[in-house]
Amino acid sequence: MEIWMLIFIVLIFSAIFHEYAHGYAAYSLGDPTAKNMGRLTLNPIPHIDPFFTILLPLIMIVLPTNFIIGGAKPVPVNPFNLQGKYAQLKVALAGPGSNIFLAFLFGMLIRFVPAISASEPLFFAFASVVFINLLLAVFNLLPIPPLDGSYIIFTLFPSISEKMRVFFADYGFFILIAVLILFANVFFYILFLIISVLFYPITGIPLAEFFALL
């Protein structure tokens, strides 16, 4: 249980950093919405969503599952305030980019600080940060609303009809849940395969070595 609580804490704070990055990128590109609503902060309280931040991850911990899902309250962004070409694309990429940054930072510490790799508790804590942030980055790049990948696709392919955009905006969450339920085995196999490809170059340690500590 202690291990899963550590993963829960890492997940929540990584998700909060992800949302802060969206808000900061939007603010730097001319949209003060997140700042005006008190969301441009690393203080976790304004980012907490009762269901996705607390209840859902705790349910996943209590249930006999091998993974945890959850997230922070999405930061509000007004695209009409954004300035510059591909501004919405930059805001969308800021979230996954922040997670890749954290994964790289903690991965480099594992690689180049011998005391971390020599201590099992420290190694597990730092490797958890790498794994969770890679998970958040890859998962959020899926092109299904409300995930960041959908905004990236809509920006790169402006020819997508407004009717299709509205449809995916309205039903994207339900499509995502259906994919997670109906194709869970295939979905998580591909997801973890991508993460394993990234995990080793960042940390210098195979992902299986991290999983062995779970």
Image (cartoon, rainbow, N blue to C red):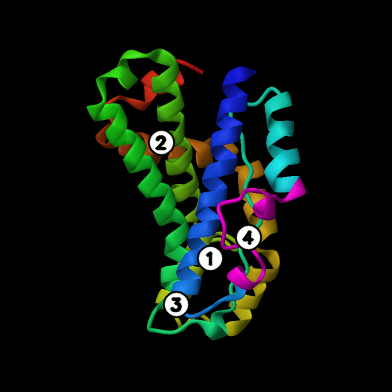
Q: Earlier in the sequence, mark 4 or mark 2?
A: 4
User: In the rendered image, which residue does mark 3 sit on?
Assistant: 29
Using residue 73 as the reference point, say whether residue 105 is left or right of it. Answer: left
Q: Is residue 43 magenta?
A: yes
For label 3, count other residues whose C-alpha is less than 10 Å away and answer few (under 14), some (14-19) or many (20+). some
Using residue 76 as the reference point, say whether residue 92 is left or right of it. Answer: left
Under circle 1, the secondary element is helix
- In this rendering, the answer to whether 116 lies above or below 173 is above
Between disc 1 and disc 2, the foreground one is: 1
User: In the rendered image, which residue does mark 4 sit on?
Assistant: 74
Label for residue 150?
A: none
Q: Residue at x 57, y 57 (%)?
A: 41
Residue 1 in which image quadrant: top right
Q: Where residue 134 sits in the image (x, y, percent)?
A: 42, 42
Between disc 2 and disc 3, the foreground one is: 3
Residues under labels 2 and 3: Cα distance? 28 Å
Residues under labels 1 and 2: Cα distance? 22 Å
Give the magenta range. Answer: 34-50
